[in-house]
Image (cartoon, rainbow, N blue to C red):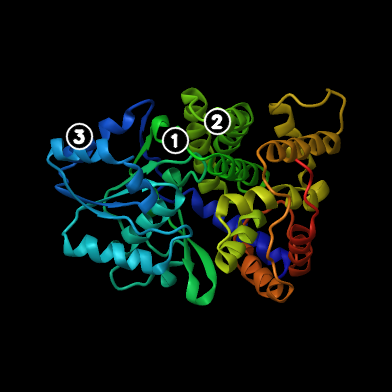
Amino acid sequence: MNALYCRLYQRTLQLASYFLPWRKPTLLEGTNSLNKLPEAISRKGISKVLIVTDQGIYSLGLMDSFLQGLDKAGVRYSIYDKTVPNPTLDNIEEALKIYREDQCEGIVAFGGGSPMDCAKGVGARVANPHKSISQMKGVLKVRRKLPPLFAIPTTAGTGSEATLAAVISDPRNREKYPVNDTALIPHYAVLDPLLTVGLPKHITSTTGLDALTHAVEAYIGRSNTQETKELSRKAVRLIFDNLYIAYSQGENVKARENMLKASYYAGVAFTRAYVGYIHALAHALGGFYGVPHGLANAVILPYVLEYYGEAVHERLAELADVLEMGSPGDSHEKKATLFIEAIKELSKKMNIPRKIDGILAEDIPLLVEHAWKEATPLYPVPKLLSRNDLNNILNLIGSAQKEEV
């Protein structure tokens, strides 16, 4: 697929996007904002909801006060708690069966990116009962109104509460792919920092770097708007100011609140401006080996930024300026290097590995193909990479030496 075709495709999609029915979720934010949601659901005339979550969330009792609030508001509910990391087609079909049999009228996603992606998949299937998820993968293939969708993130990273994307795994084909449609943007999002207090350190770190990846890929891509650039800059500033605090002081409510806002800003930015090869490679590794998405992005991010070279120096220098790095006379290249080094240093402080173990040489051609097909021609990346480039990056990720921590 030649470069001219890719850029023409991306430009056409960018122009068409101005006519799409974009929306942002109604936000409930701040400490104890979750308590406001049951009444909001009731006011919409919804008598029963399906809550999509996972067993960890359910067993920790994070939903208890919410369920009590639903009872008080007279809203009945059914719970699907079998969502797995990298949610599968089977997860969606199992939850869909409950939605239909129990005659639900709305969907609540409660958890990290996986329950939210699963919930979006259920909504897409409700809207299109005769279409499979695989028939809706890609861009703008849902095209029907979803049931009311309420997103309650318990991690600060995916931004899924703000995005048009659901990423689904098909274990039978060792594949992971996005479904992208403005219909999938949740109608309500709850940013309650108390739900993220006490998150395990490794989840705080990897989801936070996932949010950073969203902000950076949106910012360096070619489909930015003034709003997405501003939101990316805000997200980058908040993440560098708050992620390590949230990681090292898990009970710090203000840092948790700021990270939720950063994740939301980055989600709004990339849902309009797209992501790039970092995500494409992360999805391929998630589909093949079950690598958690945030971890994959965290490891891959600096490698791809360095591989882009001069194509991203100016944009990364602008992000370095946001963080007040370097001196006024520094070149774009110098500032870009400082920014990438800051990412590496932040990752090192949070014990993020420098490589992803277990990448098999015989799998690399298929990993490359999955990543290349996801990114090409869709993602408006700063520099088009070939299959050979992606092969080189995967070899770097798999062979890098671990740094001493």
Which mark is nearer the camera, 3 or 1?
1
Would you say residue 186 is visible in this rendering? Answer: no
Earlier residue among tags 2 and 3:
3
Earlier residue among tags 3 and 1:
3
Where is mark 1, residue-wise? Answer: 196
| Pick the front one: 272 or 258 | 258
Q: Residue at x 82, y 38 (%)?
A: 337
Q: Residue at x 85, y 35 (%)?
A: 334
Q: Splitting the image into 4 quarters, where does residue 83 fall?
A: bottom left
Where is mark 3, residue-wise? Answer: 39
Q: Residue at x 69, y 60 (%)?
A: 357
Earlier residue among tags 1 and 2:
1
Q: Are marks 1 and 2 in contact (CB under 8 Å)?
A: yes
- The percent position of residue 165, horizontal first and vertical second, equals 46, 54
- The percent position of residue 258, horizontal first and vertical second, equals 51, 28
| CA separation in Å, label 2 and label 3 | 30 Å
Q: For the residue marked with disc 2, what is the amino acid?
A: Ala
Q: For the residue marked with disc 3, what is the amino acid?
A: Glu
Label 1 residue SS: loop
Where is mark 2, residue-wise? Answer: 246
Label 2 residue SS: helix
Name the mark on residue 6.
none
